[in-house]
Image (cartoon, helix red, strand yellow):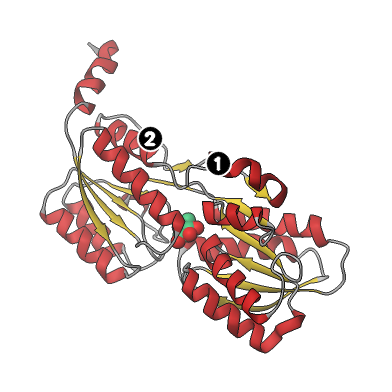
Amino acid sequence: ATTDNSDEAEATTSEKLVIGFSQVGAESEWRTANTKSMQDAITDAGHELKFSDGQQKQENQIKAIRSFIAQKVDAIVFSPVVETGFETVLQEAKDAGIPVFLSDRSVDIEDDSLWVTFLGSDFVEEGRKAGNWLVEELGDQEDVKIVELQGTVGSAPAIDRKEGFEEVLSEHSNFEIIKSQTGDFTRAKGKEVMEAFLRSDGDNIDVLYAHNDDMAIGAIQAIEEYGLKPAEDIVIIGVDAVKGAFEAMAAGKMNVTVECNPLFGPQMVGLIEDYLAGEEIPKRVAVEESMYTMDQAAELLPTRQY
Ligand code: GYE
């Protein structure tokens, strides 16, 4: 009977599950693609989805998880807007015997028994990729002045993308980050903060490092309105590799984007099914991704899925 494990697993996984998904919000193209990927994967697998959009607010996410617990869902997929402050509610889920699967963003919590696994990208590595590209590109230029548009304050991707980027630049004294502020991962905020950067530092800015493409795209608008040429007067680096970035690159307005793949819904559903079928799954699962430049944009644009 012990060798018959696979049959048993199949019998268990073909069961219809009720899955609660507490999503961050709808702040970016990346997020929209991620939501769709997760929704499709859950319903295509024949499971029932209970979806909650947190509107980038921690308290909404805590409420959503409590409601999933009250509804006795089989599993919770949770994409935490910020890293800290979720201990209590995750303990409540654990006490109720409901497994929590961290999706996209991780938490900064000592007790890692409060969640089953974290499936997401390596944001520090994305920051390093952005930094390494810049060093390759402008490494021999003197006195390179960078402005940084950070993601949501306290979120894993904002903290880690800053860290990875700074780690690389710290070894090159010709680079200086002269301004760094949050644009909350949205186009509107990216534009607004870039306008402020331009007002104070105008023609001194050589490079924009934006923690996501949406903020970069908002900033491109601000740069054009200010009368400068994005990608020429100011080098523009984004993260995500969403369609909007490929369009901007194909139009010669953005230099590079580091890929952060949001299409891991099927991978997540696989992990949930495996876990509930009694399989052991790793604590950390990575999403695969790459990096794209302006000269590749026109060719790759039609094939981009998000
Ligand atoms: O880069 C950004 C989104 O957590 C990886 O959140 C995600 C980030 C993504 O708003 O566009």
Q: Which residue does the image show at 51% across and 68% down from the upper left?
A: 151
Vertical placement of residue 154 versus 41, above or below: below
Label 2 crowd bin: few (<14), some (14–19), many (20+), radius 10 Å: few
Label 1 crowd bin: few (<14), some (14–19), many (20+), radius 10 Å: few
Q: Which residue does the image show at 47% across and 71% down from the upper left?
A: 184
Q: Which residue is mark 2?
A: 281
* Residue 14, quarter of picture: top left
Quadrant including the N terminus:
top left
Residue 302: image tag: 1
Q: Position of residue 230 (x, y in %)?
A: 69, 68
Vertical placement of residue 206 versus 99, above or below: below
Question: Is 143 left or right of 162, judged from the image as shown?
Answer: right
Q: Is residue 63 visible?
A: yes
Q: Mark 1 near ligand 1 (CB under 8 Å)? A: no
Question: Is 230 left or right of 246, judged from the image as shown?
Answer: right
Q: Earlier in the sequence, mark 1 or mark 2?
A: 2
Q: Mark 2 near ligand 1 (CB under 8 Å)? A: no
Q: Is residue 128 visible?
A: no
- Proximity of marks 1 and 2: CB atoms separated by less than 8 Å: no
Element on which disc 1 rests: helix
Q: Position of residue 275 (x, y in %)?
A: 29, 34
The residue furthest left is 71
301 or 193: nearer the viewer: 301
Element on which disc 2 rests: loop
Q: Position of residue 92 (x, y in %)?
A: 20, 58
Question: Is 146 left or right of 15, judged from the image as shown?
Answer: right
Q: How many marks?
A: 2
Q: Position of residue 67 (x, y in %)?
A: 15, 59
Q: Which residue does the image show at 45% across and 47% down from the upper left?
A: 262
Amino acid type at image mark 1:
Pro
